[in-house]
């Protein structure tokens, strides 16, 4: 049976539709050119009428009568004068044409300087995106950059602030090394001194580069609106998280996108690891966490540096120990391991007996360690070190209500051991660091370039296998430091709980050994700085 040919409308419909669209577009452009004077006059009359209404509304009521009489007299004079109506009509049309003219010409493309910059970017990308065996390459020397740059914007200095790049499908965009080369090139060619975000669309073979605003550093320590088990580590970009936190910034209150870390029995990342060089803000972050943890739990603070950065917490309600000596720190960690086991046993007994879990097992216990590598035992000493003593709290902390937070420098991260790193899946990196250092801690690199000038508390955060977020830690300085401003000192002191024991007036001092032992739970030998 012979196959019947398709109807003409189906076989040649596409060409007819394309011709029809071109004809309609041409007709619309021609009509716009012809009617442009009428459009200008209409726009001008509308603007004149709006100005007249505003003038009439602004006229006081006691002056509207004389004003209306004056206008009527002018209209009568014009109407009775020879050629008066014609002259008035010409004057109104002239005013409408002047008022409705296009004052600002619409830019249809980049200027010469911007075109040269886009051309330079295109030529710089040719060695990375071109392939000799491609029959129709998107990138070739002397090619058309308009085909690959579909969206672009420039700032006031003429530098690229937004750029959408199309690249060939055979480019290995799934390999971090290939992505890194393109990001470094665009960063260098678009101008340094700014932070760039790179969004890769593997399905559409598109790369969107945009300039990021600097994270605000004006937020300081305060009482954040969070639920029990939630801790605000810092603040990030507005489009990076779906939750905002009310904060006080200066004289007003606003909503800021917060990086909220959730702990508790249902948390998938119950422990936190903070990495950074000295002066990067790791101690500030631990102080901020301690102030928030004291709202619903107890804390143990172990400071390996021994500089007294946590002296303001000594003797406070809910602070079980503040230790910076090696011997006392190891004893404190040993007590924390025993306390974790006790909580597990008590909770198990209560559940087996059908009784509620005791209150002392439900109250969260926070273990904050700053530079634990300084507390390692010397070679030849057979006792357990900080990493070994933390195995029980790290492994069973989620079930026992124990949270471990460690802050360590990059150079000593290997000394923590694989056990500690495997159980601290919530990570924060602060300060100036290379992309390799960030990837070694977070598991992957960020999609942004490093900031040109990283203030204290500036870095990146990641929870488990989630995305890498920019973060700025709220300013929480030591209130006993002379360099701390009065506003920040008052903000931190207002968040601290009351003291359990009386201290001498003036500059605070560490608690005596007798008072420290009495304030600490059973098993803790010392809470004061020193051996």
Image (tube, rainbow, N blue to C red):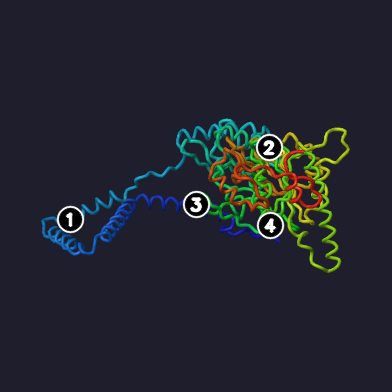
Q: Identify the mark nearer the N-term, 4 or 3.
A: 3
Tag nearer the camera, 2 or 4: 2
Q: Nearer the viewer, residue 369 or 468?
A: 369
Which residue was labeled with disc 2? 307
Q: Identify the mark nearer the N-term, 4 or 1.
A: 1
- Cα gap from disc 2 to disc 4, whole angstroms: 27 Å
Quadrant in the rendering for residue 265: bottom right
- Cα gap from disc 3 to disc 2, whole angstroms: 80 Å
Q: Which mark is residue 296?
A: 4
Quadrant in the rendering for residue 166: top right
Secondary structure type for disc 2: loop
- Cα gap from disc 4 to disc 1, whole angstroms: 84 Å
Q: Identify the mark nearer the N-term, 2 or 4.
A: 4
Secondary structure type for disc 4: loop
Which residue was labeled with disc 3? 19
Secondary structure type for disc 3: helix
Hey, which residue is sitting farthest bottom in the picture? 354
Q: Identify the mark nearer the N-term, 2 or 1.
A: 1
Q: Nearer the viewer, residue 57 or 471?
A: 471
Tag nearer the camera, 1 or 3: 1
Pointer 2 with pointer 4, Cβ within 8 A: no
Q: In the image, residue 293 lies at what x, y percent?
A: 68, 53
Pointer 3 with pointer 2, Cβ within 8 A: no
Tag nearer the camera, 4 or 3: 4
Quadrant in which the N terminus is drawn: bottom right
Instruction: Report the side of 69 relative to 289 (left or right).
Output: left
Which residue was labeled with disc 1? 86
């Amino acid at each position: 049976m012979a196959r019947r040919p398709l109807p003409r409308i189906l076989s040649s419909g596409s060409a007819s539709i394309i011709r029809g669209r071109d004809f309609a577009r041409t007709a619309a452009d021609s009509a716009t050119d012809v009617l442009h004077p009428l459009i200008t006059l209409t726009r001008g009359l509308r603007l004149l009428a709006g100005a007249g209404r505003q003038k009439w509304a602004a006229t006081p009521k006691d002056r509207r009568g004389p004003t209306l009489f004056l206008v009527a007299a002018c209209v009568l004079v014009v109407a009775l004068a020879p050629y008066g109506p014609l002259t008035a009509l010409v004057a109104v049309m002239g005013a409408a044409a002047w008022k409705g003219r296009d004052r600002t010409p619409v830019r249809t493309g980049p200027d010469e300087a911007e075109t040269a910059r886009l051309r330079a970017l295109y030529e710089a990308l040719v060695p990375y995106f071109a392939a000799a065996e491609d029959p129709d390459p998107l990138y070739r020397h002397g090619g058309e950059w308009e085909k690959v740059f579909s969206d672009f914007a420039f700032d006031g200095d003429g530098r690229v602030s937004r750029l959408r790049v199309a690249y060939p499908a055979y480019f290995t965009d799934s390999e971090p090394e290939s992505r890194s080369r393109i990001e470094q090139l665009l960063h260098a060619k678009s101008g340094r001194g700014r932070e760039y975000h790179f969004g890769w669309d593997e399905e559409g073979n598109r790369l969107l580069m945009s300039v990021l605003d600097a994270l605000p550093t004006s937020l300081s320590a305060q009482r954040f609106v969070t639920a029990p088990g939630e801790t605000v580590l810092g603040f990030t970009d507005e489009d990076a998280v779906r939750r905002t936190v009310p904060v006080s910034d200066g004289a007003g209150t606003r909503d800021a996108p917060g990086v909220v870390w959730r702990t508790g029995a249902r948390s998938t990342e119950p422990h936190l690891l903070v990495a950074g060089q000295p002066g990067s803000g790791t101690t500030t972050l631990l102080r901020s966490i301690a102030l928030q943890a004291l709202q619903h739990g107890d804390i143990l603070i172990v400071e390996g540096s021994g500089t007294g950065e946590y002296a303001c917490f000594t003797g406070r309600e809910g602070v079980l120990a503040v230790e910076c000596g090696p011997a006392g720190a190891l004893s404190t960690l040993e007590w924390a391991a025993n306390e974790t086991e006790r909580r597990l046993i008590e909770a198990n007994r209560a559940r087996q007996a059908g009784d509620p879990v005791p209150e002392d097992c439900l109250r969260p216990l926070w273990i904050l360690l700053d530079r634990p590598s300084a507390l390692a035992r010397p070679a030849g000493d057979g006792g357990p070190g900080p990493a070994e003593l933390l195995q029980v709290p790290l492994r069973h902390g989620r079930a026992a209500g124990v949270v471990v937070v460690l802050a360590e420098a990059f150079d000593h991260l290997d000394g923590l051991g694989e056990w500690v790193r495997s159980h601290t899946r919530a990570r924060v990196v602060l300060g100036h660091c290379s992309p390799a250092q960030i990837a070694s801690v977070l598991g992957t690199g960020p999609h942004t370039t490093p900031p040109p000038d990283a203030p204290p508390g500036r870095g990146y955060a990641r929870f488990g296998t989630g995305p890498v977020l920019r973060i700025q830690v709220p300013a929480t300085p030591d209130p006993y430091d002379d360099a701390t401003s009065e506003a920040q000192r008052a903000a931190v002191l207002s968040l601290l709980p009351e003291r359990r024991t009386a201290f001498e007036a003036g500059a605070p001092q560490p608690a005596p050994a007798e008072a420290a032992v009495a304030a600490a739970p059973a098993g803790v030998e010392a809470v004061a700085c020193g051996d």
